[in-house]
């Protein structure tokens, strides 16, 4: 994976200690291995940016929120691309 900065590297500096604890609504987890670094995050389900802004660590949780949104878009794009590719006819 190329590392050109952005949320991928920013998230490695974050700490989830001040993020909302998982609750009955649910949880979000993200585990990242980048080079020799390994980090894991856990928080409650984030319904909207209001949840992010009202947390104890809005900046860190915002980075997490947007990284997760970007990863979801990336995965859905890969899935969509997979089903659009036509097999080569021989």
Image: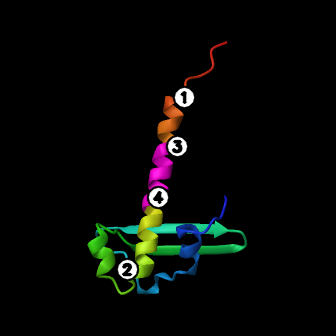
Residue at mark 1? 85
Which numbered disc, 3 or 1, marks the residue that appears first in the sequence? 3
Image quadrant holding the C terminus, namely: top right
3D distance between C-alphas at marks 4 and 2:
22 Å
> Percent x, y for residue 44?
36, 73
Q: Is residue 66 above or below residue 78?
A: below
Query: For the residue carrying disc 4, how many other residues have a C-alpha within 10 Å: few (<14), some (14-19), or many (20+)?
Result: few
Asked if marks 4 and 3 touch (Cβ < 8 Å), the reply is no
Location of mark 4 (residue): 70
Q: Which residue is mark 3?
A: 78
Left or right: residue 62 versus residue 82 is left
The residue positioned 45% from the left and 73% from the top of the image is 63
- Residue 71 in magenta? yes
Question: Looking at the image, is mark 4 or mark 1 earlier in the sequence?
Answer: 4
- Residue 88 location, quadrant: top right
Label 4 vs 3, first from the N-terminus: 4
Name the element at disc 2: loop
Label 4 to label 3, Cα distance in Å?
A: 12 Å
In three-dimensional space, the C-alpha distance between marks 2 and 1, rounded to whole angstroms, equals 41 Å
The stretch of residues the image draws in magenta is 69-78
């Amino acid at each position: 994976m190329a590392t050109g900065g952005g949320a991928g590297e920013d998230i490695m500096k974050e700490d989830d200690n001040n993020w909302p604890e998982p609750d009955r609504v649910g949880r979000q987890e993200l585990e990242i291995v980048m080079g020799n670094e390994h980090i894991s995050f856990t928080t409650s389900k984030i319904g909207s940016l209001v949840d992010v802004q009202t947390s104890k660590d809005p900046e860190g949780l915002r980075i997490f929120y947007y990284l997760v949104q970007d990863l979801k878009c990336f995965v859905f794009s890969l899935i969509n691309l997979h089903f659009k590719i036509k097999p080569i006819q021989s």
